[in-house]
Amino acid sequence: MWPELGLGYGINEHWYTRVYVSNEGEDLGLTTLDSTNWQNDFKLTSGQSSYDLALHTKVTWYAGPGQGQMLEIGPAFQTEAGLWRINTNLFFRRSFGADEVEPTQLSYQWRALYPVLQGWHWGLVGMGELGEWNHWAPVGEQSHRIGPTAMSSWSMPDGHSMRAEASYLQGKIDGQNGNMLLVTLRYQY
């Protein structure tokens, strides 16, 4: 189990920032603090071309002595193909201050959503870790996950909105076969 709780804010139309904590454990009731995270997404383009480009950054402070920090940075793309909305992200991750320092790692995320009803989208989502950014791990040692996703948004009586997304991914997690259920609920004010 890996529940997260956070608070995000759109500073302006080009900058979104979020602070959140991640817990981890075998059972939801037995999770402990794993990390504190600060994410910033800076939109570099907005409608000037057929795609939008943002710069994603995240700093993670791991809990516990000797755990260190991690910096994640990379491009985030969004485009449309017909009614499909497609997001693709490449992230470079580097750990600092930990007992064991790893070389810079490369990971990816992608999502393709299609509108099916007013306020509802469905599609596919995928993510994975490739190994060192300039020397990918052998295919059998990489982690890749893929699965269906559904997203809905609706207006609240107070004039704000809610957004919910659920995805079920199957594949490899840290080199082992596994499944992931991702659920996000966002109150937007």
Image (cartoon, rainbow, N blue to C red):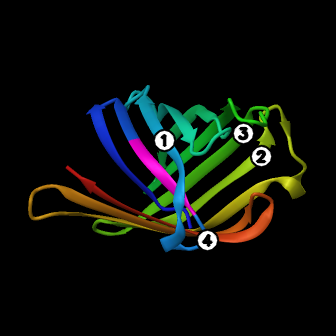
Q: Nearer the viewer, mark 4 or mark 1?
A: 4
Q: Which residues are magenta?
A: 19-24
How much space separates mark 3 and mark 4, taking CA atoms?
27 Å
Q: Nearer the viewer, residue 106 or 69?
A: 69
> What crowding class fits label 4: few (fewer than 14 Cα within 10 Å), some (14-19), or many (20 or more)?
few
Question: Which numbered marker is on residue 37?
Answer: 1
How much space separates mark 1 and mark 2, taking CA atoms?
22 Å
Residue 70 vs residue 46: left or right? Answer: right
SS assignment for the magenta stretch, majority: strand
Q: Mark 3 touching mark 4, by CB under 8 A? A: no
Find disc 2 in the rendering and name its residue.
130
Q: Earlier in the sequence, mark 1 or mark 2?
A: 1
Find disc 3 in the rendering and name its residue.
106
Residue 13 position within the rendered picture, expressed as x and y whole percent measured from the top left: 29, 32
Residue 181 position within the rendered picture, expressed as x and y whole percent measured from the top left: 55, 70
Q: Earlier in the sequence, mark 3 or mark 1?
A: 1
Question: Which numbered marker is on residue 26?
Answer: 4
Q: Nearer the viewer, mark 1 or mark 2?
A: 1
Q: Quadrant of residue 40?
A: top left
On the question of residue 142 being in view, the answer is yes
Residue found 49% across the figure and 32% down from its top: 53
